[in-house]
């Protein structure tokens, strides 16, 4: 059984309906509508998302990070309008889970502590938010909100503040923050908006991604480190030229690191006593499988 077929078997045996719809969308002519329909079950009445859509946090209530994860799935399947987007905008406009002092959405929320979660999603007051996921959510607003609305003005203001933070902070080592700024850049480009020097932003992102990617590939399968797939998955990416060799190696790694059951290893723990981690780890294995096969597909090496 080749890489694709063994992954496919694992996905069908283990995927949540949402991830199965993602798999079918990318590889079996599945519909965008099926992904949206599955995604809606994670959306709350306030328009935000919860219900363990982020597998490491089982909070049923809406949170910025869970809502951000939903926006990533919408981007993945090319959703550009509809009630699900309107709901997210409503949640972001509501002021819920927003830190006025830092002018950012919270990275974790108090109600996280009431549900199984990884230690990093436990809530405690204080600390610098560093624009994860705020940079991406501001970009979402710029891309989808009415340009005459107060929400659009707020999103633009936050985006400008985020860019100033990024400009003075590069290079730094946090891959998730980097990913949020890549999304801000992409949203602004798609919206045709230039709130700041986009060429300079692009140059900084290229530098940051190159510095974030772990060059010691021996660590990839056993430590929580950044690889090319965390930032891009096509040769058309602005990040490919500066990371050509290691991006090509990612294809080899995907094939060689596959486990006997068709999945891929999870290289972290929750660092607490919640037994739900084992369920979440399996959900992550499905997500890794989808992302890895999509990477191979985009690099023309799906059956290699």
Image (cartoon, rainbow, N blue to C red):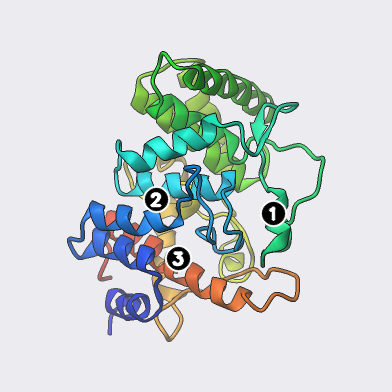
Q: Which mark is residue 111?
A: 1
Image coordinates of residue 286 in percent, x first then y, are 43, 70
Image coordinates of residue 134 in percent, x first then y, are 59, 35
Q: Nearer the viewer, residue 156 or 109?
A: 109
Q: Quadrant of the N terminus?
A: bottom left
Q: Which image quadrant is residue 144 in?
A: top left
Quick check: 204 left or right of 36? right
Quick check: 67 left or right of 26? right
Asked whether the residues under the numbered discs 2 and 3 touch, taking CB atoms below 8 Å apart as contact, a structural biologist would say: no
Asked whether the residues under the numbered discs 2 and 1 touch, taking CB atoms below 8 Å apart as contact, a structural biologist would say: no
Q: Which residue is mark 3?
A: 288
Estimate the spatial distance between the alpha carbons at disc 2 and disc 3, rounded to whole Å.
Answer: 14 Å
Residue at point 54%, 50% (across, down): 66
Along the polypeptide, which appears first: circle 3 or circle 1?
A: 1
Q: Quadrant of the C terminus?
A: bottom left
Q: Which image quadrant is residue 194 in?
A: top left
Image coordinates of residue 195 in percent, x first then y, are 49, 15
For discs 3 and 1, the disc positioned in front in the rendered view: 1
Along the polypeptide, which appears first: circle 2 or circle 1?
A: 2
Whether residue 294 is visible = yes
Q: Which residue is mark 2?
A: 73
């Amino acid at each position: 059984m080749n890489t694709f077929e063994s992954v496919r078997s694992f996905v069908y045996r283990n995927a949540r309906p949402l991830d199965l719809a993602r798999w079918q969308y990318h590889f079996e002519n599945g519909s965008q509508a099926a992904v949206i329909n599955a995604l809606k079950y994670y959306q709350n009445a306030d328009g935000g998302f919860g219900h363990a859509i982020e597998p490491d946090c089982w909070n049923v209530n809406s949170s910025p990070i869970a809502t951000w994860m939903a926006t990533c799935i919408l981007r993945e399947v090319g959703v550009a309008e509809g009630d699900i987007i309107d709901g997210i905008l409503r949640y972001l406009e509501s002021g819920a889970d927003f830190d006025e002092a830092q002018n950012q959405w919270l990275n974790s929320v108090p109600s996280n502590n009431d549900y199984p979660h990884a230690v990093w999603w436990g809530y405690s007051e204080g600390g610098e938010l560093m624009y994860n996921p705020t940079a991406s959510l501001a970009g979402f607003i710029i891309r989808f909100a009415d340009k005459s609305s107060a929400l659009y003005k707020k999103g633009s203001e936050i985006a400008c503040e985020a860019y100033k933070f990024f400009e003075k902070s590069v290079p730094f080592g946090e891959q998730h923050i980097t990913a949020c700024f890549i999304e801000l850049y992409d949203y602004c480009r798609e919206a045709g908006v230039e709130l700041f020097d986009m060429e300079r932003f692009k140059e900084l992102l290229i530098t940051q991604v190159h510095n974030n990617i772990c060059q010691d590939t021996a660590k990839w399968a056993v430590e929580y480190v950044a690889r090319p797939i965390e930032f891009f998955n096509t040769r058309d990416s602005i990040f490919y030229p500066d990371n050509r060799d290691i991006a090509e190696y990612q294809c080899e790694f995907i094939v060689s690191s596959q486990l006997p059951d068709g999945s891929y290893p999870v290289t972290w723990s929750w660092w607490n006593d919640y037994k739900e981690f084992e369920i979440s780890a399996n959900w992550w294995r499905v997500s890794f499988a989808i992302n890895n096969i999509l990477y191979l597909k985009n690099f023309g090496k799906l059956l290699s």
